[in-house]
């Protein structure tokens, strides 16, 4: 299961993204924010993927990514934008974006699978930790669940 936070200033887009992602039981939307400032106040290290609009009121999504990269180096970033301008995508990649998605081209059926695939490619097992950094209890619980026993 992966944990996702959404930062998007457009209310309908926020609602739509959350609903779309929660259709997949392997994706949990932990928080939804309208601004980068709100996200910085409320975000936790257990987020696996941060989906952010590139242009937000006040602090930009790029600046948010830069700050989050320092605090949470394991976090993946997916940038949302209405701008097809290559310079925006290039800047997002420079700031650590794993993907740059155009809002007008989002496929609501494929989006949860895309996020799960990105997390798997980066070795994220959920809860904001790469698999190689899993604690012993998490590892034991994972083994127990896979083999049909009770939790530790």
Image: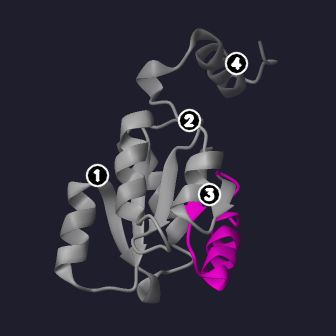
- Horizontal and vertical percent for residue 32? 66, 62
For the residues carrying marks 4 and 3, which lies nearer the camera in this image?
3
Q: Is residue 20 magenta?
A: yes
Q: Report if residue 73 is visible in the image.
A: no
Specify the label residue 96 is tagged with: 1
Residue placed most toward the observer, 49 or 9: 9
Residue located at (43% from left, 73% from top): 80
Q: Report if residue 104 is visible in the image.
A: yes
- Going from N to C along the chain, the mark reached first, 2 or 3, is 3
Specify the label residue 144 is tagged with: 4
| Residue found farthest to the right | 150
- Going from N to C along the chain, the mark reached first, 1 or 2, is 2
Residue indicated by mark 2: 45
- Horizontal and vertical percent for residue 23? 70, 67
- Going from N to C along the chain, the mark reached first, 1 or 4, is 1
Q: Label 2: how many residues lie within 10 Å, few (<14), some (14-19) or many (20+)? A: some
**Is 64 on the left-hand or right-hand side of 34?**
left
**Is 47 on the left-hand or right-hand side of 52?**
right
CA–CA distance between discs 4 and 2? Answer: 25 Å
CA–CA distance between discs 1 and 2? Answer: 17 Å
CA–CA distance between discs 1 and 4? Answer: 35 Å
Residue located at (65% from left, 12% from top): 137
Question: Residue 34 appears in which quarter of the rendering?
Answer: bottom right
Give the extent of the magenta segment.
6-27
For the residues carrying marks 1 and 4, which lies nearer the camera in this image?
1
- Going from N to C along the chain, the mark reached first, 4 or 3, is 3
- Going from N to C along the chain, the mark reached first, 3 or 1, is 3
CA–CA distance between discs 3 and 1? Answer: 21 Å
């Amino acid at each position: 299961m992966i944990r996702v936070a959404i930062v998007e200033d457009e209310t309908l887009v926020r609602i739509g993204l959350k609903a779309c992602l929660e259709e997949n039981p392997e994706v949990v939307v932990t928080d939804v924010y309208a601004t980068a400032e709100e996200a910085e106040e409320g975000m936790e290290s257990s987020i696996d993927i941060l989906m952010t609009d590139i242009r937000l009121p006040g602090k930009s999504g790029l600046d948010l990514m830069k700050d989050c990269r320092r605090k949470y180096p394991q976090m993946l970033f997916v940038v949302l934008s209405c701008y097809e301008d290559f310079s925006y995508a290039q800047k997002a990649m420079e700031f650590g974006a794993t993907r740059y998605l155009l809002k007008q081209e989002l496929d609501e059926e494929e989006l949860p699978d895309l996020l799960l695939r990105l997390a798997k490619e980066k070795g994220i097992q959920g809860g904001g930790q790469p698999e190689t950094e899993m604690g012993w209890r998490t590892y034991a619980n994972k083994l127990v669940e896979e083999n049909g026993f009770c939790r530790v």
